[in-house]
């Protein structure tokens, strides 16, 4: 509870400083809205022209895309800064400042930098979710909503876990920034397409290597196909907390490798 | 001229010193190519598109990889950083042309991209997908392709340079760059070839510069554009070059009075 209060204080301070410059703030959000819409336009045009994308219909793909985008937005508001800045913090030695505070360094990093640019992704994600829900032909009963909420929470946790595990890579390799960007940008975008069009090897990488399949493909599959014949798909309902815990362990372990630098 | 040539060489050498990110960026280009390959394979397995064959589609993607290498430009980032830090002051008082300085910087980084990434991508792409590659072998298409490539490189440089100059007014330009890149990615046919667009958007894209930075060169080399259309397109291309050139001249005339040196 204390940490929630602290987080709130941090975010309020962050917004006060950001809203000092209103136009750049609005631009940040607007640009991200347009960016996410431009990726969606691709899917929209392709399906509008060709009707089918290996048995997936427009609103099902929209659902898949929006779950991926929404979870990415939430995870990004929290963990984007550690991913992009950890390398600089390590090289310049500024990470020291985070280590000596009486709160967990990751929590400090997260609360100090609220990723306001990701509000754009969240807005588009929610609106596309609504758009697909209005048009999908599903029985919206109580179990559906429970299942939906649990799956989305899992998707968010998986996205967070991937970002958390990417951030301390700089303690192991030199210059992992480009790799992290590739994973978060390119692979993430790939994961929002129906994954059954890809080669088996890519699917396996996206399940066991970098688990983006759990973010959008499996949740959408489970929501659209109410009869679940493959019981291993139920892993989806618990994968989030597991991966999140593992990534936190990895982060803590990696942090021990940090040697202070700079002055 | 000698000055710019030595700048060119120095910058090229500098790029080769910091080359750690090449491998990752090659992998990320390849993964985007793969994504497109699988996407279109899935689409073509269900639908038979009448106008465009599958091998033409794959050739489109492969040629696109190289056109994209040619038309990527990061000058605006560099200029807006300089304006933001205030070090633009030094660049403005030095005895060289600001425009030519950035042009040669850009050309050297293009050559670097071509040597470092282009060769690897060429070998990988054209050995894996060799069975699909088709292109027009008529001389007029070849010549017009060279012209189109020149226009594409120049247009992408001009656009980015304009964004860079605008940073004299608004300092941070990454949002604008982002915006133009997003519009460009759609309207240039980078994500989805313009063939498959609704008629309205296709017609709009005819009169915007983005099409000539990506879609046009590829289509000329594929031979999907009738030769009788070449003249009409050439006029649009030259008109855009002139227009952007004029905008650059206008901005350059005004930006020096606007410049605000930050820091101390």
Image: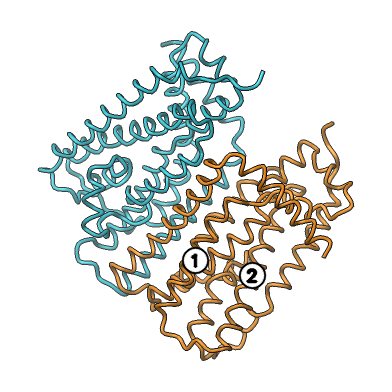
Chain colours: A orange, B cyan
Neighbourhood count class around disc 2 (C-alpha, 10 Å): few under 14, some 14–19, many 20 upward = few
Q: Secondary structure at mark 2?
A: helix
N-terminal of the pair, mark 2 or mark 1, is 1
User: Where A133 sits versus A245, above or below?
Assistant: below
Residue highlighted by disc 1:
A192
- Viewport quadrant of the C terminus of chain A: top right
Quarter assignment of residue B153: top left
Quarter assignment of residue B216: top left
User: Where A230 sits versus A132, above or below?
Assistant: below
Q: Chain of mark 2?
A: A
Most extreme residue toward the top is: B95
The foreground one among B143 and B129 is B143
- Residue B137 percent location from the top left of the image: 20, 45
Q: Which mark is residue A208?
A: 2
The foreground one among A148 and A87 is A148
Q: CA distance from mark 2 to mark 1?
A: 17 Å
Q: Nearer the viewer, mark 2 or mark 1?
A: 1
């Amino acid at each position: 509870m204390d940490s929630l209060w602290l987080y709130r204080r941090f975010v309020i301070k962050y917004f006060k400083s950001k809203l000092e410059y209103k136009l750049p703030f609005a631009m940040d959000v607007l640009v991200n809205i347009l960016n996410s819409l431009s990726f969606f336009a691709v899917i929209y045009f392709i399906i509008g022209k060709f009707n089918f994308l290996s048995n997936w219909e427009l609103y099902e793909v929209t659902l898949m895309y929006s779950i991926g985008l929404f979870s990415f937005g939430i995870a990004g508001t929290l963990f984007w800064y550690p991913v992009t800045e950890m390398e600089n913090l390590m090289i310049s030695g500024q990470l020291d400042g985070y280590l000596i505070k009486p709160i967990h360094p990751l929590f400090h990093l997260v609360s100090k930098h609220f990723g306001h640019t990701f509000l754009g992704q969240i807005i588009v994600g929610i609106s596309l979710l609504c758009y697909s829900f209005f048009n999908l032909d599903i029985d919206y009963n109580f179990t559906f909503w429970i299942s939906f909420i649990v799956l989305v929470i899992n998707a968010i946790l998986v996205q967070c876990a991937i970002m958390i595990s990417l951030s301390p890579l700089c303690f192991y390799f030199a210059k992992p920034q480009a790799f992290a960007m590739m994973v978060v940008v390119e692979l993430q975008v790939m994961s929002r397409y129906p994954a059954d069009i890809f080669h088996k090897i890519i699917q396996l990488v996206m399940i066991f290597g970098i688990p983006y399949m759990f973010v959008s493909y499996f949740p959408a599959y489970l929501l659209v196909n109410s009869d679940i014949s493959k019981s291993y798909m139920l892993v989806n309902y618990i994968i989030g907390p597991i991966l999140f815990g593992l990534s936190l362990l990895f982060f803590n372990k990696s942090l021990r490798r940090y040697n202070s630098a700079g002055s | 001229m000698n000055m710019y040539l030595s700048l060119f060489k120095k910058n090229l050498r500098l790029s080769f010193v910091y080359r750690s990110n090449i491998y990752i960026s090659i992998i990320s280009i390849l993964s985007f190519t793969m994504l497109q390959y699988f996407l279109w394979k899935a689409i073509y397995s269900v639908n038979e598109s009448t106008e465009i064959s599958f091998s033409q589609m794959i050739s489109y993607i492969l040629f696109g990889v190289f056109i994209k290498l040619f038309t990527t430009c990061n000058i605006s980032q560099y200029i807006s950083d300089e304006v933001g830090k205030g070090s633009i002051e030094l660049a403005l008082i030095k005895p060289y042309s600001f425009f030519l300085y950035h042009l040669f910087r850009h050309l050297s980084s293009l050559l670097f991209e071509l040597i470092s990434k282009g060769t690897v991508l060429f070998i990988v792409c054209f050995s894996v997908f060799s069975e699909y590659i088709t292109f027009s072998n008529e001389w007029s298409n070849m010549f017009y392709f060279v012209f189109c490539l020149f226009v594409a490189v120049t247009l992408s440089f001009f656009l980015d340079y304009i964004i860079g100059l605008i940073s004299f007014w608004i300092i941070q330009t990454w949002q604008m760059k982002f915006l133009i890149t997003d519009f460009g990615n759609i309207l240039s046919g980078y994500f989805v070839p313009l063939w498959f667009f609704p008629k309205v958007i296709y017609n709009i894209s005819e009169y915007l510069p983005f099409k000539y930075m990506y879609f046009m060169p590829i289509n000329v080399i594929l031979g999907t554009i009738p030769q009788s259309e070449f003249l009409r397109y050439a006029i649009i291309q030259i008109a855009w070059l002139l227009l952007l050139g004029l905008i650059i001249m206008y901005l350059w005339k005004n930006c020096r009075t606007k410049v605000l040196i930050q820091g101390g």
